[in-house]
Amino acid sequence: METVGKAGRTEASAHARAEEDLYLLARVKRRDLKAFEALYRHYQPRLARFLTNILRRPHLVEEVLDDTLLVLWDRPDSFSGRSKLSTWLFTIGWRKAMKALRKQDDPVEDRFIEERINPDRSPEQCAGDNRIRAALLQALANLSPEQRAVVDLSYFHEIGYRDIAEIMDCPVDTVKTRMFHARRHLRRALPGDFGDWI
């Protein structure tokens, strides 16, 4: 009996998710509200986390998140199929976030970001993670929005450099450079072995 490794299961799961996304998108194009709601439920938490890390302004996160997902409902035909649906949505979110940041004057940090609880974690796990999360968020806050985006997309959303380059509309080498500088900063900012953090 042949066993499938973790990488194989992850790849199969990602492929199944991509197929499900395309099926739901086809239904959204026919104005199926339930299909839109299914995609919304799947991508809203991921996009919210990404946008929170990039924008760091609670009032902007909701606005940009709504604008991003509204494109999915209003213009599903603008998805060309050259990438995964997730890449397309993160690209829209990134562009709208950068546009929103350019319109802002001074940053307003979310003081309660480290207190937000992930509903998928037990209270014990959340309590144990709070100290780590606070230190990591502080270190990430000192990165540029572009560096935060690369770290967030790579580590928290497991998106590859090529897809990140597509999302951020830049060469893959630029993504690698941003990650190099971000990791160097985080190594200096975080105590202990950097590998334990990310």
Image: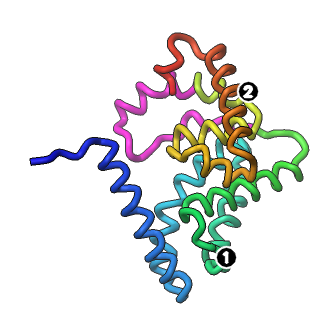
Q: Secondary structure at mark 2?
A: loop
* Residue furthest out toward the left: 1
The reply to whether dot 2 and dot 1 touch (C-beta < 8 Å) is no
- Mark 1 residue type: Ser
Point out residue 43 in the picture as x, y percentages from the top left corner.
52, 60
Q: Measure the alpha-carbon separation of dots 2 and 1.
A: 35 Å
- Mark 2 residue type: Asn
Point out residue 103 in the picture as x, y percentages from the top left corner.
89, 53
- Structural crowding at the residue carrying mark 1, measured as other residues with C-alpha within 10 Å and reported as few (<14), some (14–19) or many (≥20): few
Q: Quadrant of residue 52?
A: top right
Q: Residue at x 67, y 58 (%)?
A: 91
Residue ID for mark 1: 78
Q: Looking at the image, is mark 2 or mark 1 earlier in the sequence?
A: 1
From this viewpoint, is residue 59 visible? no
Point out residue 92 in the picture as x, y percentages from the top left corner.
69, 61
Q: Secondary structure at mark 1?
A: helix
Is residue 110 highlighted in magenta? yes
Label of residue 136 in the image = none
The vertical placement of 166 against 147, above or below, is below
Residue ID for mark 2: 142
Residue closer to the observer: 61 or 23: 23
Magenta residues?
109-134
Q: Residue at x 30, y 49 (%)?
A: 9
Number of marks in the rendered image: 2
Residue closer to the observer: 108 or 38: 38
Is residue 157 highlighted in magenta? no
Q: Residue at x 17, y 45 (%)?
A: 3
Residue closer to the observer: 75 or 19: 19
- Structural crowding at the residue carrying mark 2, measured as other residues with C-alpha within 10 Å and reported as few (<14), some (14–19) or many (≥20): some
